[in-house]
Amino acid sequence: MPREDADQALPEAREAGLPGAVAHVYPLGSRINAAGHLEIGGCDTIELAREFGTPAYVYAEDDMRERARVVTQAFARRTERFGVVYASKAFPCTAALRLFAEAGLDCDVASGGELHMALAGGFGADRIYMHGNNKSDRELEEALAAAVGHIVVDSFDEIDRLERLTGDASQRVLLRVTPGIEPETHASIRTGQADSKFGIPMAHVGQAIERCSQAGLELRGLHAHIGSQVYALDVYEALADVLLQIGDLPLLNLGGGFGIAYTRDERPPSADEYAEAMLRGAPRDVTVLCEPGRSLVGNAGVSLYTVGTVKEIPGVRTYVSVDGGMSDNIRPMLYGAVYEADLAARFGDSTPCRIAGMHCESGDVLVPEAALEDPRPGDILVIPATGAYGHAMANNYNAVRRPPVIFCREGDARVVVRRETYDDLTLRDR
Ligand code: LLP
């Protein structure tokens, strides 16, 4: 859904000084410097590639801070009763968790590992929401031992487990429900439809509320997450309606899913519009929680690669191969996700080409239809908007070492996650 006023809340994006209409896809404050190179967080990306190597995930720290501030403000302008919960799965990285903890957000974790990282990042346990459709006894014990603020209960079996594990102690919980709402987005990132492994089916919600009380759990509210990269606002209003009809509880967690721009044509709604849609139907005494992941980190990060080969197949196409691929960004292969690509030192689109990775698979294509400015071996290639679910879903296919994460701010760059070493690859082998 194109929206003229989309980035009004983030005016810096429009002044980024990047060519064409692509500025809003790059981190806030990105620009082309005097040398003609792309600059992220005040750092020259050509120099970053030289210093830290490629592939690398490069983030503008201030972009994440600004987005946390903007979404918080969007709610604060409308109500005193709200919470912004960072969905840490989008970018599980201690430094990012610390940044969002400092920005005053709460945190959504969906496994024992994410819980461990959120605590390491400095989130107070009371600010943590523990998710998962199949939490193990061990994970529940870890959550209880850490004294997490809320456990988001997802099934009757989990209520039984919690009853056993909490004993006489009380634990605050939310009940995740399956509202039967289907937003328009890729089928694999849709979660609100009736046929879903997540949440309690609508027909059983009354019974689940009763079971929570029998089990001695303190039911504080309801939760639903209908999907990800959701551009349509009306589904959030519909969701609030459905949940409010269930009952009168203090907390209403409407999940995440706020969309971002991956390509120049995409104009997601603003944080203000999402906040408005979520709050429209909510009574004043209900605290509305949102759980954004992608929208806080997606446009903050880019991936840097080095072009290794440029292969022209006469009458077919030109393949530009880079030193990463499906191990550092599996989204194009999993979801058909579409990205832009540019050369860090030469923005332009004279050469139609396909950007392929280095993995032993024909499907290892990062951008099927790209246009670069005369690509050559040695060029630094940048793919913007890889900040969410890139590092998070990275893997070691072909024994490729996972890339480092570099945070840039006012011209200073620091490694917040180091590149894996060959030794890391054999570390667990016995
Ligand atoms: N809350 C819950 C309970 C979730 O399951 C998710 C995402 C979020 C919040 C955050 O959603 P976001 O604001 O980031 O859209 N790997 C996929 C995305 C899967 C999202 C899973 N749950 C991708 O790369 O697009």
Image (cartoon, helix red, strand yellow):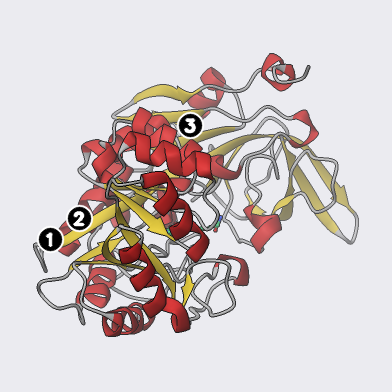
Q: Which mark is residue 296?
A: none
Pair 3/1: label in front: 1
* Secondary element at image label 3: helix
According to the image, label 3 marks what residue?
45
Estimate the spatial distance between the alpha carbons at disc 3 and disc 1, rounded to whole Å.
36 Å
Q: Nearer the viewer, residue 119 or 187?
A: 119
Identified by mark 3, the residue type is Thr
| Residue drawn 26% across the image and 55% down it | 84
In the rendered view, would you say 279 is above or below 8? below
Amino acid bearing label 2: Thr
Q: Which residue is mark 1?
A: 76
Q: CA distance from mark 1 to mark 2?
A: 6 Å
Q: Position of residue 297 (x, y in %)?
A: 40, 47
Name the residue beneath numbered marker 2.
Answer: 72
Amino acid at the residue labelled 1: Ala
Q: Residues within 10 Å of mark 1 (few under 14, many from 20)?
A: some
Q: Is residue 163 above or below residue 195?
A: above
Instruction: Point out the image quarter for the C terminus.
Output: top right
- Relative horizontal placement of residue 380, taking residue 138 as reference (left or right): right
- Asked whether 320 or 285 is in front, the reply is 285
Determine the residue positioned at 32% across, 44% down: 64
**Element class at badge 1:** helix
